[in-house]
Amino acid sequence: MRRLSFFFVKNYLFWVLFFVVFKAIFLVANHSFTAALSTGEILDVFLHGLKMDLSAAGYLSLLPGVMLTLAPLFPKAIHKATKVYTLVILIPLTILGLADLSLYPSWGTRLDSQVIPYLGDPVAVVSSVSNLQLVLSFLAIALIVFAFYLLYSKVVANKPFDSSTKWYKATPLMLLFTALLILPIRGGVDTAPLNFNSVYFSDKTYANHAAYNYFWSFFHALTHNTYDKNPLNYMDDEEAERIMKNAVVSSADSTYLVVEANGKPVNVVIVILESFSNKVIYPLAKANDEFDTAHGISHNYFDENNEVIKNLTPNLNRYCNEGITFTNFYATGTRSDRGLSALLGAFPALIKASSILEFAEKIKSVTFLPQMFGENDYDMSFYYGGDINFYNTNILLLQSGIKNIVERSSFPIAQSTAQKWGAPDEFLYSRLSKDIKSMKTPFFTMVYNISSHEPFDVPEHFRRVKGTTQSDNYLNSAAYTDSCLGAFIEDLRKSPAWENTLVVITSDHTSLLPEPSSSVYELSSYRVPMIWTGGVVKESRFVDKICSQTDLYATLREQLRFSSPLPEGTDCYSHSMFDSAREFAFFFRPDGWGFVSPEQAFYSNIDNGQRSYIFQKDGVANDSIVHFAEAYAQYLHNDFIKR
């Protein structure tokens, strides 16, 4: 019986050690973030995170504990079963752990509900890493699993169970030990169970994130990702709905900056750049730095003398100065589906669910932007270098009435496999440039590039930035995309269609790269380009108004003089970017939501219950604006649930 007791304890401590070692690996792998922590803070990461490690180890020890109750009756079989269980669990745990530390620089969060959609599409996961990273990942998985299984075999399961142990003594004791695991699982004897707030100890976001246990975080996401329950409850639902319905009313003093040529309908080209932030487009980065300085926001991403950023995207720099540029345009989320949902459906990202595009049955409740053009007899098309089945994009396009879809399979095999995600930008834009010459006018087309997506595997002959870090690779991909886009627009500029065409350049979401990376709670992590150029744009101006991806829908409807009203539901979230009565933006993450207005900006973390103000006018929160923001966020999630 003593051997069984020792085995139970050693088995539990083995899993604690596993998670502590992985925490150390996480800190080393993300050394650029860890370097900002003091020695004391690093020790606190382990100390404060231990409670979550103990809980995760408790979950993994439940089944072995139950098996040990049968050990007196079947000692050899149970001894072997515990070893098999450990090996089987080690493999997915190691894969998840390596995925967690690899994704953190891009996602800015530990493993959570964001990764769930990818589990059903391993091809997309593989496409996000280079071949070298893939090989190294397999080697790392094999090495870690082998090392820990060897440790388990030599230290924990090194001796067979005693066949002479009396079951009527050992079985009740093992049941008691297993039942006691509820204490570390819950985080102690307190009334409130363990939660993310339990390990928060620092004002540095990364320090708190590093203290998390990735398995606990992921398991919590799986078991608490209930999409039929609103994560927000600030007021009665009726009050939230009343506030939102009142917000539908807009002012009538909008400015028209799109000028038709010869009274003909305006052609529209929407360029969606993958993972582009204002930080890599110098005029926008400079404008944002001026805004932040004026509002007392400190950051480290902008350097007036950074020649790399100054010259990284010369074409986008020029378009900023030639056309209409919105400097405070915000993405509502951090992944592609969230960007498409907001830009094309005027439906913001969500907290627990990534976006409404995850749910095929809910997509039909959304009226997408292309449908507005279809109702006005536009020739519609969509160009993408990757696979349009990802995130139900194909459903979105077909529901919108787009029949001309050019995607990865439309390109020759040599082009469609030239990058991990599909056809590189030079082939994508070349195809559109060729096809646009024969499009029936008026036309509405969207082009969505892939070359600036991880793993940033742009052609070797095109590397403007020396170095091989992820930051260097990202910068090279941004420069490559800019050059391909520039070639397309210059070709379009020479065509007869240019005179009556509006080109809208924006992005699905940002990247935390390049280093120094932004925190996911900084405004710079959500500012994306919104640039209008083309023959119908007769003046250049920078618009500093705060607006959102969801506003593109209403703005295009207004500027193109479409007579049909905004669809019901869309009118709650989309307002003209030239409407003087509306100036705000929201962004949503798995752990909460953020709000930006001229008076104040803040982030509400629903995991720890804290609200952090990014800036406040006169240093005081405006309660009426906060109340509106809370109503919007609560109403949005109720709306999602009802659809």
Image: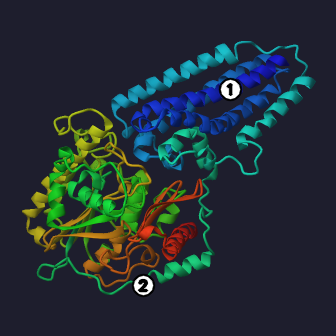
Query: Residue 505 appears at what percent x and percent y?
Result: 24, 61
Image quadrant where residue 473 sits: top left
The residue most toward the front is: 618
Q: Is residue 120 left or right of residue 163?
A: left
Residue lying at 46% horizontally and 59% vertically, measured from the top left: 357
Query: Residue 552 appears at what percent x and percent y?
Result: 33, 70
Q: Is residue 335 left or right of residue 579?
A: right
Decide: is 389 above or below 138.
below
Three-letter code for the amino acid on which mark 2 is drawn: Val
Mark 2 and mark 1 lie on one chain; the one further toward the N terminus is 1
Image quadrant where residue 201 sits: top right
Residue 213 marker: none
Q: Quadrant of the N terminus?
A: top right
Say if residue 606 shows up in the picture. yes
Query: Residue 462 appears at what percent x and percent y?
Result: 17, 39
The residue most toward the bottom is: 252
Are there few (<14), some (14-19), or many (20+) residues within 10 Å of tag 1? Answer: some
Residue 249 marker: 2
Three-letter code for the amino acid on which mark 1 is drawn: Leu
Q: CA distance from mark 2 to mark 1?
A: 60 Å
Image quadrant where residue 332 sits: bottom left
Q: Is residue 23 left or right of residue 420?
A: right
Q: Are marks 2 and 1 in contact (CB under 8 Å)?
A: no
Query: Residue 98 appears at what percent x and percent y?
Result: 48, 33
The residue most toward the right is: 168
Q: Which residue is mark 1?
A: 13
Q: Secondary structure at mark 2?
A: loop
Decide: is 599 above or below 11.
below
Decide: is 227 above or below 642.
above
Q: Nearer the viewer, mark 2 or mark 1?
A: 1
Depth check, front residue: 50 or 464 = 50
